[in-house]
Amino acid sequence: MPGTGKWMGQGMEMITAYVGLGANLAGPAGDPLEQLAAARQHLLTLPMVQGGAFSAVYWTEPFGVPDPAAHPWYANQVGRLDVVAGTKPQVLLEVLLQVELALGRERGAGRPGLSPRPIDLDLLVFGEVILDDPACTLPHPRMQDRAFVLVPLAELAPNLTLPAPGGGLALRHALSRLIMELDGNRIRQISPES
């Protein structure tokens, strides 16, 4: 059974990676739900990915933006990818950025980090790797404060322990710190615990 470490699958050693997917604008594949479907298809056909699973889609109110009412709600989900051992997390991240580009994501000058987007792919966890690199930080540095990440992640891996220096952080504990409203597939986050 896949966890956060290495395991054997399909006759080869594998690493479990978790990826956050989100969209709140239309893009080349269509509306946000079609954008997520196209991203899922891209992810499952990557040469280093041998399988995976995806949470349900959750609609989430924009959180942490200056004027949430001015932003469309996001369609968010998390994917578990079975990645061939030996793949570097930086390589997977670079491929995620290429998938974003193919699905209409523009990064760079003039594009604030919290602006609406046709697709957003975040590498959340890569096995038990802890990495503090400007290009690739693992686990994702803000995931423990984001209900739109933790709720769908808990659907896939309710007993997951997030890698952390000196020991891990239980996903259930991280979720319990958040103040949020969960109504079916709609998430409205009030705040992380201070």
Image (spheres, rainbow, N blue to C red):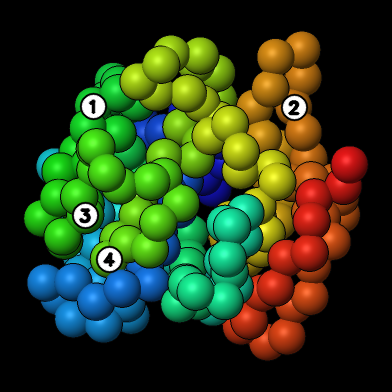
Tell me whether circle 4 and circle 3 mark residues in contact (CB < 8 Å).
Answer: yes
Residue under numbered circle 4: 118
* Three-letter amino acid code of the residue under disc 4: Pro
Residue ID for mark 1: 91
Q: Can you see residue 1?
A: yes
Q: Secondary structure at mark 4?
A: loop
Q: Report x, y in % for residue 94.
A: 22, 32
On screen, residue 18 versus residue 170, left or right, reads left
- Viewer-nearest of labels 3 and 1? 3
- Mark 1: which secondary structure? helix
On screen, residue 21 versus residue 48, left or right, reads: right
Q: Which residue is mark 3?
A: 105
Name the residue tied to disc 2. Answer: 168
Question: Which of marks 3 and 4 precedes in the sequence?
Answer: 3
Kindly identify the residue that appears in the image at 14 percent across and 75 percent down.
29
> As shown in the figure, which amino acid type bears the numbered disc 1?
Val
Q: Secondary structure at mark 3?
A: loop
